[in-house]
Amino acid sequence: MSQRFPVTLSSHARRWAVELTEQKSVTGTDGEAAFGPWLAGELRRETVFRNAEVWTIEIGPRDGRHCVAMLLRGTGRSTVLLTGHYDTVGTSDYRHLEHLATRPEALTRALRDCLVAAEAPAARLAHHDLAGGDFLAGRGLLDMKAGLAAGLSVCADFAGEAKPSGNLLFIAVPDEENNSAGARKAARMLPEICEERDLDLIAAINLDAIADDGDGSKGRVIALGTVGKLLPTAFVVGVPTHSGFPLNGLNAAAIAAAIAARLEWAPELTEEGGSAPGTPPSLLGIRDGKTGYDVTTPRVAYASFNVLSYRRTPTEVLDRFDKLCAEAASRLLQELQSRVSATTGQVDTARSVPVHRYETLIERLGQPERAQLEAVAASIAAGDLALPEKCRLITEQAWELSRLTGPAIVTGFGSIPYLPTNLSELPAAARLRAAAVTVAAEAMARHGSAVGCADYFAGISDMSFLGEAEEASLDIVARNTPAWKDSVRWPPRRALANIPTINIGPWGRDYHTPLERLHVGYAFEVLPQLLRDICRKLLG
C-alpha cells in the first residue's frame, strides 16, 4: 500500500478537526442551528466530494437544527455509516479565555502559559500535556469534532479511489449533549434513506471520544457496545404537619432522603459490564415541593437517580428500584418508631408506605381527569424546563387528580432512555465484530499503536439509538415517563436503527471542562487508518 494514504488521511483529519472546532455549535444556541447548513455547504464545496450527494435533514418543524448527510458511492449496495455529533457544551467556563475556546492553536498556547504555576493535579497534568506538544486544546475538539474529522478524512480517501467497493454514508447530528434529537431523527430516517437510494446498511461506526487520564491505553479502544442509562424517579408524598408537632405527620423529604441513602451505590442496581466493574447508581437530584419558607413539613419530595446498565432491561431496573424504595421507606418508619417509643410510647404512624408506578396512577383516573392531565402535560411541555422537572410537575398533577392520600411513593422515569447495545450473533454483527478484533490486533504492526477492544463504550452515546437494542423494552419506559407524549415525542415503532454498531473515536482528557484536550497523534494519524481499515474489511 502506498505511503500516501496515511499522509492524506492525517492532513485531512487535522484540517477538518480545526475547522469544525472553530465553528461554535453549543447545544441549544443559534450556533448549533447554523452549523448543519454551514457543514453541508463546506462539503459541497470540497473538491474531493464533487461526486458525493450531500443533503440536510431537519430535526422537526420549526426546530432549526439539521442532520448533515453525505453519501459516497462505490460499487454494490453494501454501505457503512460513519456518524457522530457536532454539538458541544458551553464555553463560559473558560472565563477570560472564552474568546479562544474554539481556536485550538491559540487556546493551547494560552492555556500552556496560564498553567505554568498550577498546583492542582489535573491542571499540572494539563500543562505537561500541552507543553509536550502531544495534545491540542479546544471546546468540542475532543468531544467530538476530531472524531467527525477522522470520518471525513476516510470519506475523502474513499472518494479518491477508483471504483471502491461498497458505499460510505456520513451523518453528523446535533443535540447529543441534550436529548439526542439528532441521532433519534437519523435512526428513524435511515430505512427511508436506504430504500430511496438502494443501499444495504451493514454496519455503523460511531465516532465519539474516550477519556483517559493515563497513558492512553484505555482510550485507544474499539468499543463493541455501549452502556445504557435510565433515570428512575421517586415522587414521595408525605403527611404534612406543623414542625412543632412532627409526630403528627410524616415528612416527605425524610422519606426521599432515606431512599437516596439506600440507593446510593446500591449493589442491587450495579451491573457489571463484561470484564469491567459496573458503575453504581447515584442520586442526581432531590428536592421538596415547597416554593417558599414556612414551618410545615414538606408534603411532597422528588428524587432522581442515574442508573447504568449493560444488559438489564428497563423492566428489570424499575422492578429493583421499586423494591429498594419500599425497603428504604419501611426501614425509616421502623427507625422513627424506635426513636420515640422509649420516651413517648407507641406513636400512631403509618405501618408502610405504598409504592405506585406512574402507569398505575394513571389507570385510576377517569376520562375527565385524564383529559385534564393531558392538557396540563401539554402546557408543561411547551415550556423550557428540563425533562426531569417536567416529569415531576406532571406526576404531582396526576397524584392530585387520583385523590389518593399519603404517605406514598410514585416511581417512574424522568428522562430520555438510553438503551444498552450489544453486537448480536447475526451474520452482519458477527462480521463487524471480527473486523474490529482483527483491525485492533493488527494495529501495532500496521500503525505503530496498540489498540484494544472493549465490551462497552464507557459513556452514554448516540449508539443507543443506532445499535442493536431491545426496542420492545421501551414500552415500560413510555408508560412510566410522564412527559413522554408531549416532550419526548418518541415514535411508537421503528425508533431505533437496530444496526450492528461499534465506537471508534479519539482519546484525550477532561472534556466538558476548560482543560479539554485531544491526543493529536492518535486522532490524526492512527484513528483515520483504523476507520479506513475496518471500512475496507466490511466493504471489500
Image (cartoon, helix red, strand yellow):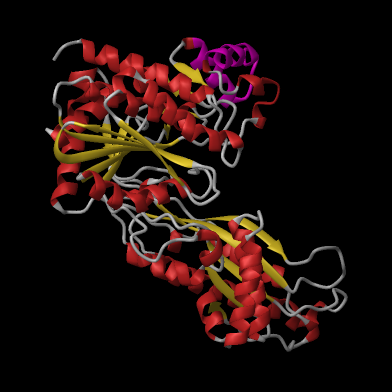
Q: Would you place residue 115 above or below residue 530 in this image?
A: above
**63 over 413 or under it: above or below:** above
Magenta stretch in the rendered image: 105-131
Q: In the visual, does 328 lie left or right of 180?
A: right
Q: Quadrant of the N terminus?
A: top left
**Is residue 121 shown in magenta?**
yes
Instruction: Examine the structure image and report whether residue 236 is included in the region drawn in magenta.
Output: no
Residue 227 % position (x, y): 38, 50
Work out whether residue 374 can be spotted: yes
Camera-side residue: 271 or 364? 364
Q: Main secondary structure of the magenta part?
A: helix
Q: Is residue 168 above or below residue 161?
A: below
Residue 242: image location, x then y, percent: 85, 77
Q: Residue at x 50, y 73 (%)?
A: 322
Coordinates of residue 25 in the picture (x, y in percent):
54, 33
Q: Position of residue 272 (x, y in %)?
A: 36, 53
Is 514 rendered above or below residue 460? above
Q: Residue at x 44, y 64 (%)?
A: 268
Q: Nearer the viewer, residue 365 or 330?
A: 365
Q: Nearer the viewer, residue 70 or 422?
A: 70
Quarter of the C terminus within the rendering: top left
Q: How many marks?
A: 0
Q: Nearer the viewer, residue 134 or 62?
A: 62
Image check: 470 left or right of 536? right
**Any part of residue 334 in sight:** no
Q: Residue at x 46, y 11 (%)?
A: 133
Classify residue 296 as left or right of residue 400: right
Residue at 37% x, 51% y: name it: 465
Residue 459 left/right relative to 288: left
